[in-house]
Each structure stands twice: as C-alpha cells, then as structure tokens.
Image: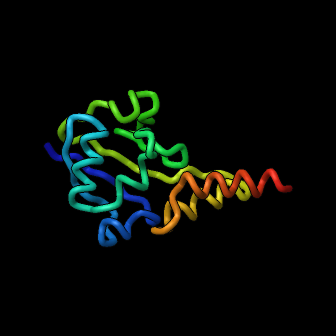
Amino acid sequence: MAIEVRIPTILRSYTGGAKVVDGSGDTLAELLTDLDSRHGGLRGRLITDAGTLHRFVNVYVNDEDVRFLGALDAKLSDGDSVTILPAVAGGAFGFAAAAAISSHSISLHNAAAEARDAVAAR
C-alpha cells in the first residue's frame, strides 16, 4: 500500500528535505507510525503526549480534513494523498505554534503554554 504524504517546509528537516514521501498504513495513526520509522521525530511533531493530533497541525486525506474523518482513526487506502499543513493563526499564539513545529528543542505543548502566558500578560 503506497500513500503519498506531502510534507510542509517547516517539517522537511525530518525527511531530509523531501517535499513528498511515501508511507503505508490502514489508518492515519498507522501511517504516522510508519513514517516515523523512516523519518524519526516526525510523528512527535504531529501527535501530542495524550495521543491526539496537535491542534496547530492540519492533516488532510484527499483534501478532506481528518478531524471530520475520525482523526487518527481516519481510514486510508492505496493511492491516497495525505497533506500535512501547519495551522495558520495570527498574533503571538500563532507565531509560537509555528516556532514549536520548526524547533527541535521546543515541544508544541510548551510553546502553546508560553504563548498563552504572553497573551495573558498583555
């Protein structure tokens, strides 16, 4: 089973600069596990410690938002196209999310907490 996965620029350091990689799996969760076995660290940028998709990452299967397809349980088929996109948001909170995705040393959880603190301090 071959599934084409489009990787955003901000995560290409995990794929050796590749814009598109192939993976396999019957669900999005299985696909991300498969990708992580070949592109270590990628899954950690997309999945929270609680095992859900980060809210600052949008994932689409054949142009359909996976949040409406069962999130990590979204079913995949041979030939599907998966697109990963960082969520776009304004203000300090959006910048913190983008920085967290690109940073190897800051988790999204910590960045979100820092952004909430910064917004609360205003």
Indicate left or right for 113 with 24 as reference: right
> Is residue 102 positioned above or below 31 on the image?
below
Q: How many marks?
A: 0
Residue 75 placement: quadrant: top left
Seen from this angle, which residue lies furthest left? 1
Nearest the viewer among 48 and 20 is 48
Q: Position of residue 117 (x, y in %)?
A: 74, 54
Indicate left or right for 28 with 89 as reference: left
Indicate left or right for 88 with 33 as reference: right
Which quadrant is the C terminus positioned in? bottom right
Seen from this angle, which residue lies furthest right? 122
Residue positioned 22% across, 46% down in the render: 3
> Is residue 16 positioned above or below 93 on the image?
below
Q: Position of residue 19 (x, y in %)?
A: 34, 64
> Is residue 44 positioned above or below 79 on the image?
below
Colour theme = rainbow
Q: Position of residue 90 (x, y in %)?
A: 70, 54
Which quadrant is the N terminus positioned in? top left
Residue positioned 34% across, 71% down in the render: 17
> Is residue 8 positioned above or below 77 on the image?
below
Residue positioned 35% across, 58% down in the render: 42
Q: Position of residue 38 (x, y in %)?
A: 21, 60
Residue positioned 55% across, 52% down in the render: 109
